[in-house]
Amino acid sequence: MNQRNAIEIDGLVKRFEDITAVDGLSLEIREGEIFGLLGPNGAG
């Protein structure tokens, strides 16, 4: 079965003034997958 990507991210960078929160995030989430993203303190 050929599944398509529901979400595709390549090289995402997010900054808040002098703080880089995300640096170079790349990921693919396929249709039908369940995906969770948690930080060090358990926040998502």
Image (cartoon, grey):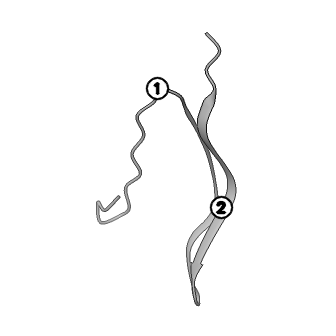
Q: Which residue is mark 2?
A: 12
Amino acid at pointer 1: Gly
Marks 2, 1: nearer the viewer: 1
Which image quadrant is residue 18 in?
bottom right
SS at circle 2: strand
Give the mark nearer the N terminus: 2 vs 1.
Answer: 2
Secondary structure, mark 1, is loop
Q: Residue at x 58, y 89 (%)?
A: 17
Q: Is residue 21 left or right of residue 10?
A: left
How many residues crowd around disc 2 within 10 Å: few (fewer than 14), some, or many (20 or more)?
A: few
Query: Which disc number belongs to residue 2?
Result: none
Task: Answer left or right for 35 relative to 14.
Answer: left
Task: In this rendered view, identify the residue nearer to me: 25 or 3.
Answer: 3
In this view, the residue in front, 30 or 43, is 30
- Which residue is identified by label 1? 32
State which quarter of the image contains the C terminus.
Answer: bottom left
Q: Position of residue 22 (x, y in %)?
A: 57, 68
